[in-house]
């Protein structure tokens, strides 16, 4: 595959020619290479001449003519002609041979097409922390969006060549866990749940599950590690009514985390590399020592580092961090006058811990209610000596479920919410992931449940999956040996290309660039948009171009090869979204 027969390679050729005209080692990085809206405007168009003209001291149209000549010299017969349009845009008309070479390159890359696009010098060790729902209730639709987004982003970054690890941060410290324990104990005693406790229907079954979890923990030393806690008899369990609320809360966290793991697995979220617990940030660790050699907790370790760097002070009995020195609108409390650490102190320790674990970049996927935390967290990270640009806090927006034109309300404390399991039962994993990923994370989603269930071309995920299944059916009908023969020598064919074939090939070779943009912009929704457009263009090709039984064996082979490339690329796009690519529907 020639480097010029890829969309990225062609842009690099344009940049190289532009740099030569400008007399510099590099050209203006704002130079674009785009597909025009109409075929009669060419295959690609560039704004290079408009950007080069001021430095060249010539009119843009004159610079465009020079650039066209330079590209003709570089591309040879691959460039049929060029045209200067408007104030100085350069439109490029590429040959059928160029397009066939591009298709051959897609097929030659196989499963690796679009992979590892990150230059070696830009590769980083990245930790993506996402979902991190409070372990005091089931996962709801808001958590589902965070889960789908974080999982898809991690897939895209890893596919693009980054070293990615996934982490779930369990908020198991503070009053919320105690309140959950008090709620369970009240139910076990037949009493009313405290007004500020947890009232959802999910709490009642926790009584027995928590008793089992506690019994399992107490008896672990005497049992074989493979023995299931569920096998414990009632005689092994202490009634929840007699257990301390704090212990009940801690046991409930273990139960709820297990439920979360099951829910995430059912939602096709790839396994987390780490489960970090907030409570562990307050426990002494042997690898962290103070000046006297005593083991300290990650929180105390981080606060000591901030104090050593001169960024803390005491006022009104509390310990403060001078976050205003780093752009925050006011200083923040780290330790209250009561001696209690704030959540902010835990967050600082957590990010310092990830930094000390050797991650080059931290990506946090946070809920919509965390918008005000961004400035203070970046300030604290910089105060610790880190580069604030290496901490990214991506704020998710809300999800509204629309059923029969009405929105479903969610409230975890009252128990009036739609769980992830509810969502999956109603529309399935594929539709749930698609609709949660089809919009940018910073926009609110109205998820139309009726549309998501629909099996028609109006439902985008169904449309894309159907295109994949249609290709699979066609290739199966052609037969494996026939398809294999068709793939041989596709780049050497002399058959002319139908406009629909050219359009589809250009869409295919745009895939690596789309992956790169999705990775750089933290925007997996671009992959969903690309997959839908690719499916639409394949459908147009299928409508306009006969494949099996085409006018000649060579033309059939060429079109079968295009079907194979389309199937692989649709399947890869869906995989990056965590959506299935079915062979039949």
Image: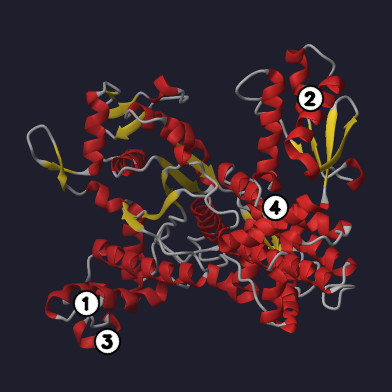
Q: Where residue 94 sits in the image (x, y, percent)?
A: 82, 45
- Which residue corresponds to mark 1? 215
Measure the C-alpha gap from mark 3 to mark 2.
Answer: 75 Å
- Which residue corresponds to mark 3? 231
Question: Mark 1 or 2, which is nearer the eye?
Answer: 2
Residue beneath the point at 20% across and 87% down: 235
Q: Where residue 117 sits in the image (x, y, percent)?
A: 55, 47
Identify the colour scheme used. Answer: secondary structure
Question: Mark 3 or 1, which is nearer the eye?
Answer: 3
Q: Is residue 182 left or right of residue 37?
A: left
**Residue placed most toward the observer, 201 or 102:** 102
Mark sitting earlier along the chain (4/2): 2
Q: Could you tell me if the residues under marks 3 and 1 are in contact, i.e. CB atoms within 8 Å?
A: no
Tell me, yes or no, if residue 410 can be seen here.
Answer: no
Q: Is residue 276 left or right of residue 201?
A: left
Helix or strand or loop: what does disc 1 sit on? helix
Mark sitting earlier along the chain (3/1): 1
- Which residue corresponds to mark 2? 49
Q: Which numbered disc covers residue 509?
A: 4
Res 137 quadrant in image: bottom left
Measure the C-alpha gap from mark 4 to mark 1.
Answer: 58 Å
Q: Where residue 571 sits in the image (x, y, percent)?
A: 63, 66
Measure the C-alpha gap from mark 3 to mark 1.
Answer: 11 Å
Measure the C-alpha gap from mark 3 to mark 4.
Answer: 56 Å
Helix or strand or loop: what does disc 2 sit on? helix
Measure the C-alpha gap from mark 1 to mark 2.
Answer: 75 Å
Mark sitting earlier along the chain (4/1): 1
Label 3 environment density (alpha carbons within 10 Å; few <14, some 14–19, many ≥20) = few
**Residue placed most toward the observer, 389 or 221:** 389
């Amino acid at each position: 595959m020639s480097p010029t027969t890829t969309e990225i390679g062609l842009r690099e050729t344009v940049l190289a020619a532009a740099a030569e005209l400008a007399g510099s080692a590099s050209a203006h990085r704002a130079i674009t290479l785009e597909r025009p809206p109409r075929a009669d405007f060419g295959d690609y168009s560039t704004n290079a001449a408009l950007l080069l003209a001021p430095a060249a001291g010539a009119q843009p149209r004159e610079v465009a003519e020079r650039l066209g000549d330079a590209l003709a010299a570089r591309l040879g017969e691959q460039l049929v002609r060029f045209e200067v349009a408007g104030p100085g845009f350069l439109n490029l008309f590429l040959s059928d041979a160029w397009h066939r070479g591009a298709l051959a390159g897609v097929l030659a890359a196989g499963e690796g097409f679009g992979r590892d696009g990150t230059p070696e010098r830009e590769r980083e060790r990245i930790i993506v922390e996402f979902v991190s729902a409070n372990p005091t209730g089931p996962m709801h639709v808001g958590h589902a969006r965070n889960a789908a987004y974080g999982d898809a982003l991690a897939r895209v970054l890893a596919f693009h060549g980054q070293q990615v690890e996934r982490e779930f941060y369990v908020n198991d410290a503070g009053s919320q866990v105690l309140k959950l324990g008090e709620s369970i104990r009240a139910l076990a005693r037949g009493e009313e749940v405290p007004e500020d406790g947890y009232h959802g229907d999910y709490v009642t079954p926790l009584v027995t599950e928590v008793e089992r979890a506690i019994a399992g923990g107490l008896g672990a030393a005497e049992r074989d590690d493979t023995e299931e806690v569920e096998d414990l008899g009632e005689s092994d369990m202490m009634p929840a009514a007699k257990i301390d609320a704090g212990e009940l809360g801690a046991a409930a966290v273990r139960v709820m985390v297990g439920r979360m793991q099951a829910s995430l697995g059912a939602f096709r979220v790839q396994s987390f590399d780490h489960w970090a617990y907030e409570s562990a940030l307050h426990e002494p660790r042997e690898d962290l020592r103070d000046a006297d050699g005593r083991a300290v907790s990650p929180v105390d370790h981080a606060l000591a580092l901030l104090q050593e760097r001169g960024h803390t002070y005491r006022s009104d009995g509390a310990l403060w961090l001078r976050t205003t020195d780093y752009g925050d609108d006011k200083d923040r409390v780290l330790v209250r006058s009561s001696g209690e650490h704030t959540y902010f102190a835990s967050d600082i320790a957590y990010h310092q811990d990830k930094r000390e674990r050797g991650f080059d970049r931290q990506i946090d996927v946070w809920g919509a209610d965390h918008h005000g935390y961004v400035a203070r967290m970046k300030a604290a990270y910089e105060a610790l000596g880190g580069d604030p640009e290496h901490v990214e806090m991506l704020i998710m927006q809300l999800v509204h479920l629309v059923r029969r034109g009405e929105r479903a309300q969610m409230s975890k404390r009252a128990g009036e919410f739609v769980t992830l399991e509810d969502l999956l039962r109603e529309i399935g994993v594929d539709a749930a992931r698609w609709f949660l990923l089809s919009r940018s994370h910073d926009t609110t989603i109205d998820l139309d449940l009726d549309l998501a269930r629909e099996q028609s071309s109006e439902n985008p995920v169904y449309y894309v999956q159907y295109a994949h299944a249609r290709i699979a059916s066609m290739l199966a009908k052609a037969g494996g040996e026939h398809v294999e023969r068709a793939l041989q020598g596709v780049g050497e064919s002399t058959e002319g290309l139908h406009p629909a074939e050219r359009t589809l090939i250009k869409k295919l070779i745009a895939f690596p660039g789309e992956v790169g943009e999705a990775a750089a912009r933290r925007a997996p929704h671009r992959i969903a948009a690309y997959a839908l457009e690719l499916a639409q263009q394949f459908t147009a090709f299928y409508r306009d171009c006969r494949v099996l039984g085409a006018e000649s064996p060579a033309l059939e082979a060429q079109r079968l090869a295009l079907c194979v490339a389309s199937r692989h690329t649709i399947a890869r796009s869906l995989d990056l979204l965590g959506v299935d690519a079915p062979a039949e529907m």
